[in-house]
Amino acid sequence: MDRHRCTKRSKPGALRLYSTAISVALAAISHGSPVRSQPEKASSLAVQPNTAARRSFEDDRFGLFITWGLFSLVGDGEWVMEQDKLGIDQYQKLPPIFNPTRFRADQWIKLAKASGAKYITITTKHHDGFCMFGSQLTSYDVVDASHYRGDPLKEIAAACHEQKIKLFFYYSLLDWHHPDYFPLGKTGKHSGREIKGTWSRYVAYYQGQVRELCSSYGEIGGFWFDGMWDKPEADWDLAGTYRLIHELQPAALIGNNHHGAPLSGEDFQVSKEDRASPGAAGSGTPALTAGLPLETCMTINRSWAFNARDTEFKSTEDIVQGLIASAGRGSNLSLGIGPRSDGTIDQLISQRLLEVGAWLKTYGESVYGTRRGPIPPQPWGVSTSKGDHAGQRIYLHVLKPSSGKPIAFDPSTPWVPFLFGKSEPLKLTRSKDVLELELPPGALAPIDTIVVLHPQSSSKGQ
């Protein structure tokens, strides 16, 4: 993301906002008609009893994606078993020394709340097959196999419920450890497992664990599945899995990182960076399905899990602008962080999260509860929209003023522009048959200059 800002002044004392090819979008905010976010067409996949939960999820706009497990001991990302070709006999030396004595769930969730996140997604089982919760279906879990002998998920769930943070479970369908994950898929070929197994038993195993997760931790926000891309043609019985979740947790939402269009029973669409996942090449962003919420995931550095060598942390500006860019495209942002094996979170990560929270405390109105605005993403930034009719507002997020055509308004438009938090309308100057928006000197904010468009009949500023 470009951190540098450029300004082009049309005359002393005024800054013109620039764009490219926005005449069609601007037609939506002219001629006195109320502006709505991009219409949500009814989807055949979207008729579920958790419709309200979907809308609430869209309102949240910001979450944290917490990747934590045995791999955190190695400090080289969550794919270390595959990347370093570690066999099960080697990898199983990790559980006895996994002992997160400094883990404090309440501190994690208080930090999440302070960051402005409305939900978290936490690892329950990753591709290595080790379960970060107490399961009755295996002894390869944190309660039975680790030195810790506790269930961190119970503490996390309790803290989330207390702090009113929604709790989503990451669960990998791929399993490099389980003897019935057979035949092998694209990955896990160096685990040293016996070349045998019964697939139907594995499906019963993973569905049994899904049942445990739905039944043992109170109300949950939903599931974030991963790993199906390892064996895309296998019979995963996703219909049965999704039906089970929706029966046990009617308001729970389901997303699946299978790198394709949403399947029946899925409630939101995900797009994830896969820089550190060689077996998941080419995830990309699949075609979107109208009516389903979107979530974009990105890491705070270059790794999902703790990586001691990865010091390329994004700046606060990068994170906030990523959040705004996602909102302007009608998507949530889930920010990935990786705690250390002892349960602590890097001080720089904590600092970044607190700074993001401070920004949202002031400007969150332009992000939370919004939908994609009527102006599509432009070189200068994006737009978001909130409300309807007389109470509607459109937020122009000017992230990178750049060269091109000025933002222009039809002279008959009923919208009046204000700088966020100001009560004095901005100046519109006539150029030929259009009005052009100008910003006063010093108007550019460090991260995001927000222009709020109010209906003329209720143009009172902030």
Image: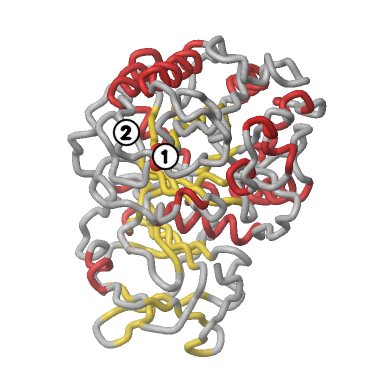
Q: Nearer the viewer, residue 106 or 80?
A: 80
Q: Nearer the viewer, residue 379 or 227?
A: 227
Q: Residue 12, relative to residue 18: is it above or below? A: below
Relative horizontal placement of residue 81, taking residue 340 as reference (left or right):
left
For label 1, the residue is 185
- Give, as a three-letter code, the residue at label 2: Ala
Give the mark nearer the N terminus: 2 vs 1.
1
Q: Reply above or below: 237 against 307.
A: above
**Quadrant assignment for the N terminus:** bottom right
Q: Is residue 461 above or below residue 141?
A: below
How crowded pointer 1 is (Cα within 10 Å; few <14, some 14-19, many 20+) is rated as many
Left or right of 317: which side holds 96?
A: right
Total marks shown come to 2
Are the residues tagged 2 and 1 within 8 Å (C-beta)?
yes
Please name the residue shown 32% across and 33% down the image.
Answer: 234
> What residue is shown with label 2?
234
Evaluate whether residue 121 shows in this view: no
Extreme residue in the front direction: 195
Give residue 299's position: percent from left, percent from top: 58, 51
**Gap in Å between the C-alphas at discs 2 and 1?**
9 Å
* Amino acid under disc 1: Gly
